[in-house]
Structure formats: C-alpha cells, structure tokens
Amino acid sequence: MPNLYDILYGAGVALSAPVWLLRTRARKKVLGAFSNRMGHVEPRQGDEPLVLIHAVSLGEINATRKLVDELAGERPELKFVVTSTTDTGYNRGLELYRNNPRVQVVRFPLDFSSAINRLLDAVRPAVVVLMELEVWPNFMKLCESRGIPVILVNGRVTESSFRNYLRVAPVTKRMFSRLATVCAQEQQYAQRFIQMGAPPDRVEITGTMKFDTAQVAQRIAGDDELAGSLGLQVGEPLWVCGSTGPGEEQVILDVYRELLRDHPELRLAIVPRKPERFDEVAEMISSGGFELVRRSQVVAGKAGIISRKAVVLGDTMGELRKFYSLARVVFVGRSLVDLGKKQHGSDMIEPAALAKPVIVGPYTTNFAEAMNAFRACDAMCEVHDAETLRQAVEKLLAAPAEAAAMGARAQQVVRQQQGATRRHVEKVLSFLK
C-alpha cells in the first residue's frame, strides 16, 4: 500500500508536470527515470548471500571495485548488485563488471515503495552498502521492515547538504536513525551525521576510499609506448592538464603560450574530462595557432609525422594515468573555473600517487578531505587564476628539486591515507556473520 512518502512524491511529480513536460531535456530525464528506475530487475537464482552496493555516480562507482574485490576475496560465495542513479555511473559500472559473473549492475530505484519492493524482492540482499550520502526515507523504511542492515560507508556531508537536511529534520532524523552503521571520512562529517539523526554509538571515522583507488608507483605500465607514439622524448618537460572542463582549456593554452617564451622545449598535453568535448578542444587548439596531435589518430594510424612542437590532445579513454606518469608538472582540471558545485574538482590523488608536483584551482570541494590531507603536508599547489597558474608552472619547471620534493610529499600522503576500504570491508563482513 502507498504510504505518506509515496503520496508526497506523487503529488510532487503531478504539481511539477507543467514545468518538466514543456522542457525537452527535463521531460526526457523524468520519463527516463520512470522507465529505467522502477525496480524491474530479473530475479536472481540461488541463495548465496548478496551485498547490494549503491554508488551514485562515476567516482563512487570506481571506488566500489576495490570494495567488491576485497569482499569477494574474504567470502568467495558472495554475490553483488551494484546500483547507480546517473547514466555515467551506470555505464561505468557496466564497463567495470562486464566480465564478472558475480556482479550485476542495475539502476537504483526511485524512492517509491513499489519500485523498491520490486528490487528487494528480485535481488534479496543480506546487507546494503550506501556510498557517501545516498539515503532515502522509503528505502530505509522498507529495508528496516525486512531486517536488512544498511551501512553507509565513505560518508561525507557537505555544508550545503547538511543545511538542507536540517531543514526537514523530522524526516531526516528518523531516516538516519535507521542506519546500522555510519563510516564517516572525517570528524566533521561524523558530527554532522549525528546531528542529522544517526545514533552516536553507530558512527565511526574510517577515512576516505578515494585514496585506495590510486596506484602508488613511480611509473605506469605502457607510458613509454604512449610517449613514443606521440613523439615525446625521454626527459623532455611535459605539462599534463587532466580532466579539464569548459573554460579551462583556453586559459591553459594562453598560459602555455607565455611559458614557451622562457621554456621553448616545454610540451603540453590536454586530456578533457568528457569525451563529447574532444572535438571542441581540438578546434580550440588548432584555432589558437598551435600544431595538434590527437592520440586517437595515432592509435588509428592516421596521425602522420608528429611535430615536436605539437600540443597533444588525449582523446582516448583509460590513458589519463599514463599521461600523468610522463608529466613533469600536472594540473588537475574542473578546479580553476566554477562549473557548479557538483563539478568542483577532479581526482588529484592519482597524479599525487605517482609523486608528481600537482597544481589545482580553488574549486576542489568534491575532494575536500583529500585536499585537507595534502595541505597539511604542503603537498599540493593551489592557484586562483591564469596568472597564478602561470607562476606555479614556471616555479616548478625552474626548481626541479623543489618540484620533486613536493611530489614525494604528495605520494607519502597517499600512502598514509590508504586503508579505508579495508576498514569498510571488515564492517560489512561483521553484518554478514
């Protein structure tokens, strides 16, 4: 039977219909959700214990891999369902687990009782693991009614989310009180979870899993092949700008033009965050008067003779870490231009794990915990605009010993912060006994 939450959700959809029905993008999003997220999942066979892991989007989905691997190593009979709400997260999940018969990737249901019950009936989880902060009142209520423990791992609550939850405290306090355990990334987040309703004796600090996905190394396998194919010389200074977003590439190119005056041997590689922007960035490079080589054309054998002055566009998937491995200096994008709160910062931990001197902009709240750790050890360079970016790159190029020391400190921070996944594994296993 529908409950109060179902009625409120239904009323919200109906009242907002005149808005989303008239807007093509919104209409596709709403209708797509009702088509794909109503819990229609093929019932699983067998009675092995199953862990349902919910990760909202791309970064969280990536973090599930190590969690799944370690749980499976401890309990070989376990099955897994990994859910996501975003298209990018769902597609990444399919990519990660396509060859793993023990893992099924599905869409997380909308918070309607009927949709949730369909999913729970079909997959029959022994325990549910929520990543970071994806807690819904109906989902929590129905899991509790079935005796399914729900654990929140890698927990974080931003200031804005915290304020929003407190505005509807009567709902959120009951919802968070149903959590079996909260594993928070740091003390501030732990306190916020308690204020939102999580029982204090169920909240503990376990660190962030983001550090555990990074490979601590000096080199990445295959980076020499990448260098050779792009005409990069051993020891040649390379500035790699990874996971860049709209508005940043033009700033980077302008800064690069200035740097070439004193560093004519400096090469530049840009790896945009989103594949749909590859052509746009290629045009930007060419129209700026720079020679261009696209990694995709090299792979396809269509690049021809590569100039040693060409700007490299990394427009293939899965090679960003190799680019970082070749870099003398790294800039991590989606941090210099304000692209909205959901896009504040990209993963600076990967290049740090490779002992690279890393530069970021002022917008890094998606990696706030990691940045706190790097700041505490003077292991990251933060800039605010084009001029401070130029000065930072200039300084790191001119002082290689200082740059190497900063990179070494960053790598040490990564080593020290790793281990959160293992702590989460032990917590999940304690509920499977």
Image (cartoon, grey):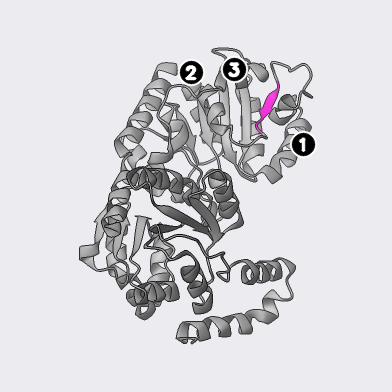
Magenta extent: 310-314
Q: Secondary structure at mark 1?
A: helix
Disc number placed over residue 353 in the picture, else none: none
**Residue 419 % position (x, y):** 31, 41
Closer to the observer: label 3 or label 1? 1
Q: Which residue is mark 1?
A: 283
Give, as a three-letter code, the residue at label 1.
Glu
Residue at 39% across / 47% down in the picture?
Answer: 67
**Cα separation between marks 2 and 1:** 31 Å
Front: mark 2 or 1: 1
Q: Does 12 appear above or below 229?
A: below
Three-letter amino acid code of the residue under disc 2: Ala
Q: Residues within 10 Å of mark 3 (few under 14, many from 20)?
A: some
- Crowding around mark 2 (Cα neighbors within 10 Å: few <14, some 14 to 19, many 20+) is few
Residue 116 visible somewhere in the drawing: yes
Dot label at residue 263: 3
Q: Nearer the viewer, residue 30 or 72?
A: 72
Residue 160 location in percent, x, y? 43, 64
Name the residue at 62% across, 35% down: 271
Sequence order check, earlier mark of 3 and 1:
3
Element type where label 2 sits in the image = helix
**Main secondary structure found in the magenta portion:** strand
Left or right position of 426 against 411: left
Q: Nearer the viewer, residue 312 or 111?
A: 111
The crowd level at tag 1 (other Cα within 10 Å; few <14, some 14-19, many 20+) is few
Q: Measure how far apart labels 3 and 1 are at the Cα level.
A: 24 Å
Q: Which residue is under mark 2?
A: 398
Give the side of residue 21 with respect to residue 97, left or right: right
